[in-house]
Image (tube, grey):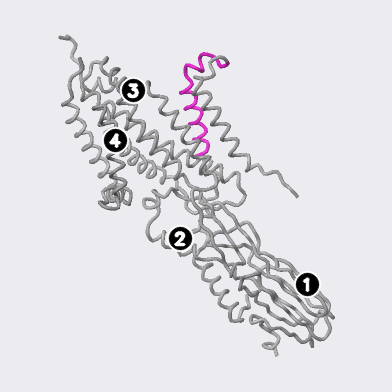
Amino acid sequence: MSLTEVKPYDVVKKQSRLKINGFVRVFTSLVIAHLVAMVLSYNGTGSMGGSANGGMFNYRFNLISGDMIFIFTLIWAAVIPYGLVKDEQRDIDFTFVSNRLTNHLSNFVFLALMSLFGAIMTLGTSLLFKTLVYLLNSNVSVHTSYAFFDIFIAIAVMFMYILLLASLGYAVSLMMNTHVIMKVVVPVTIFGLAFLDPVHGTFSSMFQFYVFESSLILLSIKVIFTVIALFGVILLVSNRWEVRA
Amino acid sequence: MSTFNIMGLIPFVIFFAILILLIIGVTRGLSSILPTSFIKHQNRIILMGYSIVVIIGALGYFLIIDRDSEVAYMMDEERYEEILEMDRALLNGTFDQFEELSVQEAWTFEVDDEISINNFDVEGGVWDTPIFIKENDSLDGEVEVKFLTPEQLVIRGFVVDEEFPVPSITSRSDTIRIVTTDLNVEMELLTHEGVFNRFLVSESRSEVMDDRMHFDNTSIQLLVIEIPSGVEVVSDSDRLFDHRQEAE
């Protein structure tokens, strides 16, 4: 029995700080992902073309946006949580004075901070990319641009989507780590559902529910409730796990 | 003439930057070459360096990019209506706003009593440049051909750097031969990430922008042929408008 009373808040705070320091390479990997996305986006993420005056004018507009950068960030956000729940990481977590609740909470704090960093860097990289294209090309025009306050809305929207993907990634990774067989069952189930989506439409309706939302407040409510529900399920399921000897 | 294209180098520069970052990452900071302090903090150094580049780029976006060229700003309602009116006038031959356009190119040819005008459109196309005939008594045995266009070429709501393509105009045995040339325009358009459009662009503004993106001024181009009095004009062009008859 310890004479020192440890508050869960202090444990979570300490663990989160340690995880940020320990997983700093995660942020470097985002930088590399963004650099790759910029190269792939250089010739445009889409294009539109046509002709006017009976073929006298043929035009082709290459659309320059940070879509690819955003997609790469989402992939990064979905994959990174796997590293948080790997067996060796769970072993490290047991060396701290903690329980499953503080462990998950510190992971959640890490994922939230990671999502915020990802959102800021994604927008920043997108603006950097557009500035580079503007400076390096002679024939550039602006279709839509950010006003200064738009960047806060953009960061908030991105944060919500990244957090959603990171939480989903975390939940799926945890499920995959419950048993060796789950490492096969979970991906197969996901791919199976995706493959049969034209029949049951589960993924399509989930996609529409989040991606077609045009109100930031409603999107925030949807994402926050989803994340809370996911963590609730994670806590319930992980409490049933056997304790480590 | 070949020109050095710096743009073509950019993907290679970024590729090598990535390669260097990967090498540093894989070899844990090129441990044999770089100082220990760098190897120890390589992730922080990379993050800090990239963050500075991102901040400079983001500031550049707000300070350097001419966001006034945005489609909705560019095409104000008054100007939009004015160009539509010009287009209609060019179609029916009632166009008289010659001073609104600028002369992009002019030619002078010798002429006798009669002049024949052959107007050929671009190969495979259907465009027929409108021709306005005017009388100019100061011309003596000569015709003056002027190609008039707006100062800026607007395609699908965007001002493009290229100018209107000047038709090829030649004269032989009192016959003026006009051949329209085509133009290929390639342009980069800076635009929002798809996911943000719904949050940042209001529905009404989006409708205006869509409307403007169906607009261009490519049809606002014409030829004015000034001829001395007494010269007869022969042409089979459907879009030849003889303003001398109106004057009479």
Kindly identify which residue carries mark 4. A167
Of the residues tagged 2 and 4, which is closer to the observer? 4
Q: CA distance from mark 2 to mark 4?
A: 37 Å
Kindly identify which residue carries mark 3. A19
Kindly identify which residue carries mark 1. B170
Task: Classify mark 3: residues with Cα within 10 Å, few (<14), some (14-19) or many (20+).
Answer: some
- Whether callout 2 and callout 1 share a subunit is answered yes
Residue type at numbered disc 1 = Thr
Q: Position of residue B201 (x, y in %)?
A: 40, 54
Q: Position of residue A99 (x, y in %)?
A: 20, 21
Q: Nearer the viewer, residue B101 or A209?
A: A209
Q: Nearer the viewer, residue B97 or B153?
A: B153
Question: Which type of secondary structure does the marked residue at label 3 adopt?
Answer: helix
Q: Which mark is residue B208?
A: none
Q: CA distance from mark 1 to mark 3?
A: 77 Å
Sequence-earlier tag: 4 or 3? 3
Question: Which type of secondary structure does the marked residue at label 4 adopt?
Answer: helix
Q: CA distance from mark 2 to mark 3?
A: 47 Å
Residue type at numbered disc 4 = Ser
Report if the CB atoms under discs 2 and 1 are less than 8 Å apart.
no
- Whether callout 4 and callout 3 share a subunit is answered yes
Please give the chain letter of the residue carrying mark 4: A
Q: Residue at x 63, y 78 (%)?
A: B96
Please give the chain letter of the residue carrying mark 1: B
Q: CA distance from mark 4 to mark 3?
A: 16 Å
Residue type at numbered disc 3 = Lys
Of the residues tagged 2 and 1, which is closer to the observer? 1
